[in-house]
Amino acid sequence: MATYKKRGAKKSLTKPDLSVQETDSATAEVFETLDTSASKAEDFVAKYQNIILTVIVVVTIGILGSLGYQSYVVEPASKEAVSELNQAQYYFNLAVNSQETDSLYARSIRGGEGKYGFDDIIENYGGTPAADLASYSAGMAYFNMNDFNTAIDYLKDFSSDDILLSALAKGAIGDSYAQLGDTDQALNYYEKAIDASQNNYTSPKYLFKAALLSSTLAKNSKALSYFKLIKSDFPNSEEAAQVDIQIGRLENIK
């Protein structure tokens, strides 16, 4: 279970910095491709996060239920935390489908209508599955508000045995570094996302992003190996339809 850092007074929120560092034209083109792919991850998370939350909490409570202390202390706290998380998640989901996204994402973080936000859940229910997921959701909220440095801080605090969420969190950190122009760290976290889980959804997505960045960084052998992995191991993925032209380009580079 993750150990969370205190982030100041309850219900406080630093206004997101909407500025994004400019990059040269070649790198910017790569980042535009990464942006398009990242939005699909956000849509996936918005659609399935409540289901993932329920599964994690139910499994965790079932395990802890056999111990007396946990039954009387941890389990009630977990259930209460989930109840609080539902409202914060409601604002997050509204933001995904709204034009007034920043205000709704901010409310999901700091709370509203007498309910806790993600920050309050992290502070008051540390050690529960809900606090873990609140850290992840807050990170994604800051990412969607273009406050990439803060998104990185929250997502690095996130820890979960759920391999899909773990991969998505590392991939979102990679996307954040990419937006900040730190290509080396972006590549590092895309590779961590690849290692976190082998599945038909996140694996080809982050292999493709890692390949594009590797190519931008003149690491052509690495880029070629990633593109070929997509073609061989994930031939039915959306990314596989785009790799042949990339493989041909890289194989013709002398």
Image (cartoon, rainbow, N blue to C red):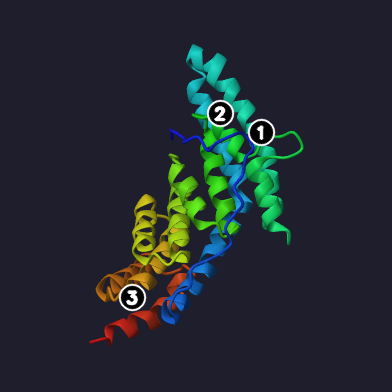
Is disc 1 surrounded by few (<14), some (14 to 19) or many (20+) residues within 10 Å? Answer: many
Instruction: Using the rendered view, name the quadrant where residue 98 is placed.
Output: bottom right
Q: Is residue 40 above or below residue 161?
A: below
Q: Amino acid at mark 1?
A: Glu
Q: Is residue 200 left or right of residue 89?
A: left
Where's the N terminus, which quadrant? top left
Q: Residue furthest top?
A: 68
C-alpha separation, residue under disc 1 versus residue under disc 3: 44 Å
> Would you identify the image quadrant in which residue 42 lies?
bottom right
Residue wearing tag 1: 84
Q: Front-most of 60 and 150?
A: 150
Dot 2 amino acid type:
Tyr
Pointer 3 residue: 215
Determine which residue is flagged by label 2: 125
Q: Judging from the image, what secondary structure is the residue with disc 1 in?
A: helix
> Relative to 111, is 200 above or below?
below
Q: Position of residue 196 (x, y in %)?
A: 37, 50
